[in-house]
Image (spheres, grey):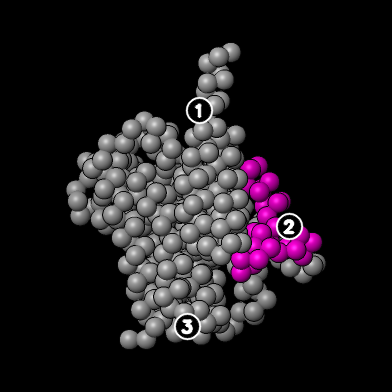
Amino acid sequence: MDATLWMILLIGLGTYLFRAGSSVLGSRIKWSDKTREWLNFVSPAVLGALLGPLLLLNQDQWVNWAENKALIAAVPTILVAWWSRRLLPTVASGVGLYAVAYYLL
Amino acid sequence: MNRQDRISMALKDALPIVIAYFPISVTFGVLAAASGFSSLYTILGSVWIYSGGAQFMLVGMIGYAAVPTAVITTILLVNLRHILYGATIGPHMKTWSEPLKWAAAFGLTDEVYAVVSSRLKSGERLMPAYYLTFAFAAYASWIAGTSVGIGLGGLVPPELSDILEFALPAMFIALLFGGEINLPTLASATTGAVLAITAGLIGLGGAGIVLGGLGGATVGLVVKNYQNRKQRSI
């Protein structure tokens, strides 16, 4: 087997074990109220952690503000998300705004 | 609510994800083909890994010839966040059979988690008919889109595939800002972003997502507790 196939198999297996192990364990443990409250903030925290580097870094280096197409497109996309509260219009306008930034910069 | 109603509700809730997943997975198929992935490996990526961020990273990292062990470690570090998702959803599966829990876990992506957890926050019970229909619809869309992307492969100009890559951050923006936004959630998102960026800058890479998730959730809770105390003292 070649290296790419190994990578796909191991990444898939690892990801599944993270998902399944924690779900099954989570269903057996009784979490305290504080823990459950903490878990509510996991989603925004992880989404922030995913977005931050995607919008501001390129291969672990700062992207120059004036040339940062992703950040320039992200600001109006955030407004669309806030206003529409819907997934599809946000993704569609995000890609559209990024296309505008891509051709203008 | 009967089983039929739950299935219809799941399909209704899944529709935006199904529609959004399709172009994103088409993009994955196109990018994978452009990076020299065989059709078989590309579809296997979507069927077996089923994690958009991980799949995009895999294609990107192979593109700049990273060492396989480094690729696997980095991507799995980023995907450690799924443990937090399972820990949140798991308690709502207490009454489910064991095989059902193991099957359900496969479909627990960022987007499925975000939508299902917001339903649970409003006090609804998590029923297998609802969750499995929802998760399967999203999975089917992801695989269908990947297949179309493989087919389009060479037809899509590189400029267009560069632009389409923004679909992934746009989806994260939609999930973050389309949900409940208040001071504690903003504080947790900002902390998560700052920690992940700092980790990236000092070369910790993938671990930053997990650090950001843990630190951000803790700051969110601290801010909420502070708000509650302030309200009580007024």
Circle 1 sits on which residue?
B225
Left or right of B94 in this view: B88: right
**x, y percentage for residue B139?**
39, 62
User: Magenta part of the protein: which range?
Assistant: A55-84
- Kindly indicate the quadrant of the structure image that contains residue A91: bottom right
**Real-space Cα separation, disc 1 to disc 3, in angstroms:** 49 Å
Q: Helix, strand or loop at disc 2?
A: helix
Work out whether disc 1 and disc 3 sit on a shared chain. yes
- What type is the residue that disc 3 sits on? Phe
Mark 2 Cα-neighbour bin, 10 Å: few <14, some 14–19, many ≥20: some
Callout 2: residue from which chain? A
Left or right of B69 in this view: A58: right
- What type is the residue that disc 2 sits on? Ile
Residue at the outermost front position: B202
**x, y percentage for residue B203?**
56, 65
Q: Residue at x 26, y 44 (%)?
A: A27
Task: Answer whether residue A76 is visible to the viewer in this image.
Answer: yes
Callout 2–callout 1 Cβ contact below 8 Å: no
Q: Residue at x 19, y 48 (%)?
A: B97
Q: Helix, strand or loop at disc 3?
A: loop
- What type is the residue that disc 1 sits on? Asn
Left or right of A91 in this view: B133: left
Callout 3: residue from which chain? B
- Kindly indicate the quadrant of the structure image that contains residue A84: top right
Callout 1: residue from which chain? B
In the rendered image, the vertical position of residue A99 relative to residue B107, given as above or below? below
Q: Helix, strand or loop at disc 1?
A: helix
Magenta segment includes A99: no
Circle 3 sits on which residue?
B37
Q: Nearer the viewer, mark 2 or mark 1?
A: 1
- Residue A72's tag is 2
**Real-space Cα separation, disc 2 to disc 1, in angstroms:** 34 Å
